Amino acid sequence: EAVSFFTRVYQFFSFLGIFMMAFFKAATLTAIPGDKPTSFAPKPYEFTGRRKLTKANLTELSTIKKASKLLNVTINDLMTAVLAQSIQGYLSEKGQAKNLSQLRALVPVSLPRDGDPCVNKWSFVSVKLPMCESFSKCLSSVTKSLTFLKKSPEPYITLALQKFVGTIAPRVIQQQTAF
């Protein structure tokens, strides 16, 4: 019984630490500096109108599902790693490899529904995009960070803060959290 008690105390303080980290990250997200300028965004949150629509070859969802099962990862893990590697390759071609450490993406997280099965609850959480030498290292890093995210309270805290900001915060703060 003593081991069980100490195990529960350890679990409580572990969860408390993770909760505090998640709260601090979500609460200070708008206060941290933006990503470094790249070809994607010369200035943070500036939309210049110079972007052009490009096409890529379509990949069947069944192919993506097979790849994720073969690699034993989720589809989100796989697609986030593909995105990170694609951005890394593009920016390397543009000679902007030095900016790679600051790239992030907003990842949608679906949360359990309350009562009404027709209402989805979503939260967007900021995730660093890993910039690695190989796709396998990138995929491993993405899987580790997204698995941790799924088990953390961060998406719930972010949703609560978004609701709070959306209802009573000044418009300037609301605009910062919309991007």
Image (cartoon, rainbow, N blue to C red):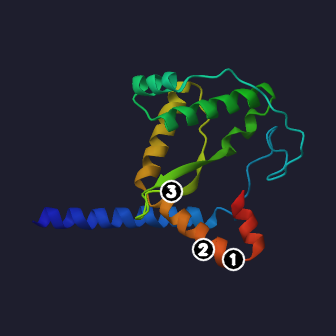
In this rendering, which labeled residue sits more in front, label 3 or label 1?
A: 3
Q: Earlier in the sequence, mark 2 or mark 3?
A: 3
* x and y percentages locating residue 75 in the rendered image: 49, 34
Which residue is at 68% across, 31% downward?
88
Q: Left or right of 19: which side holds 163? A: right
Mark 1: secondary structure: loop
Q: Which mark is residue 120?
A: 3
Instruction: Point out the image quarter for the N terminus.
Output: bottom left
Which residue is at 54% across, 69% downward?
160
Residue 32 visible at all: no
Instruction: Point out the image quarter for the C terminus.
Output: bottom right
Which residue is at 63% across, 66% downward?
28
* x and y percentages locating residue 95 in the rendered image: 80, 29
Label 2 close to label 3 by CB (< 8 Å): no
Q: Amino acid at mark 1?
A: Ala
Mark 3: secondary structure: loop
Q: Which mark is residue 169?
A: 1
| Disc 1 from disc 2: Cα separation | 7 Å
- Closer-to-camera residue (99/64): 64
